[in-house]
Amino acid sequence: RLQGIRWQDFIAFLLFGSNVTEDDLDFDDRSPPSPIYVRRAATHGCRLVEHSTQILEQRARGKETLRHGHMGMDLPLGGLGNPAPMASGQYFVGPSGVPYKRRLASGNRQYCMNVQHGHLYLRADDYGTLCMSPLAVLAQTTESNQSWASRESIIERLTGLRQVARLSSMGLADLPGQGRGSTFGDLPVSRDPDLLQNDWEPIPRISSTGLLKDIIANSGVAEDSIDEESVEELRRLLGKELVLEYNSEGELRLRGRLVFLHLESRTEARSRVLVQTQSKAKPFGQDYGTGYMGGAPDGTMTTYQSATSSFMTPPSRSYTTEDMLRRGQQSENLGDRSFLMEDVMSEQCEDPRIVTMLSRVEEPWMTTVARYCQEVFNLCSAAISQIIESCHDEADEAYLCEVECPTSVAWYHKNACCGLPLSYKALRVKAVIGVVEEDHHIMGDLLCDSFSTTEMTNKLKGFGDCTTELGGFIIRQWQWLRSENAAEAEGFARPSIIQKLPNHLVENVAALLIGVEASAPLKEDCFGQSHSVDGRSKDLSAFGKRKWTDYRKGGMEVPASLGGIRATVDAAKFQLIQNIADQILSLEENSKEEIDFFKSILVNSDHGVKEFLAQRDLMEPADEIQSGRVIRHAGSMVDRYISNI
């Protein structure tokens, strides 16, 4: 999504850099600059949802495949001159992805012209100037702080702020203006425009558990609140579901994000609100272990990983009672790893509330609503779109507020907060469904008077009075209540302090769809797959791996088949990208040394990279290399080197 910038400007920057001329920008989708060329057809495209101004990827069919706007560029995928993955003979990756074979006698190259491996597909759509509603503007606002911080910059900064605050309280220093600004030491810090208290700023990303433990201990938290397990869990949650912030007095707090969905069913006879009336936890059997594998209701194998997985939000899915009992019977056949829900006592959490969704740090609210409705309510895409499009943005219906930790939604956050204050910024929106007869067909069981949903989680400790270290089920009871009966539910009543949504925004909006394909149209790739006019999806990706669909069938969390990877680039972010590129390219006097440095890292194994960095004093003995990534520990030279870059 390109907001406030033209797609031509973005493409020109990627091709030519920041020093573009007017002639470089004078092109459209019918005459793109070389090496990009026009494609006659493609099976993917974008569409704009007018109400929410969302841009969605879609499969094109029939005449839609022939629309203008399709472009492509051939790539030497795998690296020019590297061995090509072809079974028939020793081939190498050639220019534009055409493989070649070296002929030792003559020294010439024999190109395999019927094969082309590596193609970049581009599709551009310009939707013109749009007037975006407050909720649409908020949907494009996410928090992102990718900068890394060293131990010295964080602790020294916080210590200095506390000293200034202490002197100010004694009348010896002037506090206003201290500790404010857009930097944290020498590191840039991204501001969150929606913060209810403007004096709180996010701390840059923390690289190690040891560094996080030092920061918390330095803030004055009691030592008995800081244990290794909680600190490690908190580090995993930071940047995913929680943000660590500081204020002008050097104090720390944790902040998460929620979405309150006031879901109202309105008919001619009555108007009712969906409320969670009860929630309870049922743990797995004692011999079960930290993970679970079993048959899903659709007959496929579903794996839920332990708490050390990269996704910190407990995976959830709705099941009927028959499904859960069938899972229990299947688990009995696994021998000692038994799973009998009826043999354990359930823990209940009294927390009546309207639909409350935990949002990830860099997740737009519309994505949060769509994910929850799909995973918990098992709604189809048409029903989810109907709910999102019916959300009101009037001042009385949609606002931001600050709330405490929802015990039945984010109970595991309390276990990991290490004694730090924990609060949540919540967006409250109202959606009305059931007005027309069509809603009753697509909403299914959601409009029943009462129903229950079941979510499977790998963490139950902290839910109510639950102390087990095992995972289990969270069972939620839902009921449609009249407004007077739902008044006590959390999130229903308007709090005394709220923040209004941003104003309407009039801006140019464009879309750029980018995808890597195995070969150009009407060509064969190195794996023997043909890119023919039938438009069928191939079994292997351009990199020789199975498609995400196959991993999804195995129960793994992978991006969606359509629109799974999205980015929003506005004028400020585009300028930031250009500044970073200019900064890197300005190091011309050291360009040869820089190029050799990164070449040595890219071509080496993990062991080779470790030796290479150690020889240049850029890596401490405690640091490790795992899958090409430097696992950095507090105070290592790598932190300072990356900060300097």
Image: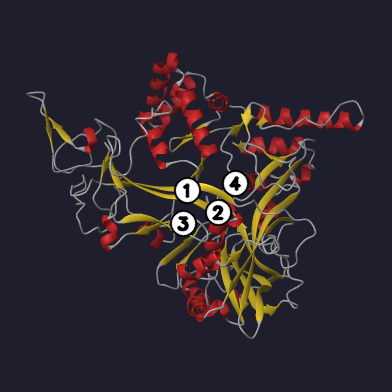
Q: Secondary structure at mark 1?
A: strand
Q: Secondary structure at mark 4?
A: helix
The residues bearing labels 3 and 2 have C-alpha atoms spaced at a distance of 32 Å
Q: Which residue is mark 1?
A: 509
Q: Is residue 463 visible?
A: yes
**Circle 3: residue type:** Glu
Q: Say whether disc 1 or disc 4 marks the residue closer to the N-terminus.
A: 4
Residue kind at label 2, given as amino acid type: Met
Question: CB atoms at circles 3 and 1 under 8 Å apart?
Answer: no
Nearer the observer, disc 4 or disc 2? 2
Q: Which residue is mark 2?
A: 132
Rendering coords of residue 608 (x, y %): 40, 27
Q: Are marks 3 and 2 in contact (CB under 8 Å)?
A: no
Of the image marks 4 and 2, the number of the one nearer the N terminus: 2
Asked if the residue at tag 1 contacts the one at tag 2, i.e. Cβ–Cβ closer than 8 Å, the answer is yes
Q: Amino acid at mark 4?
A: Arg
Residue closest to the eye, 7 or 580: 7
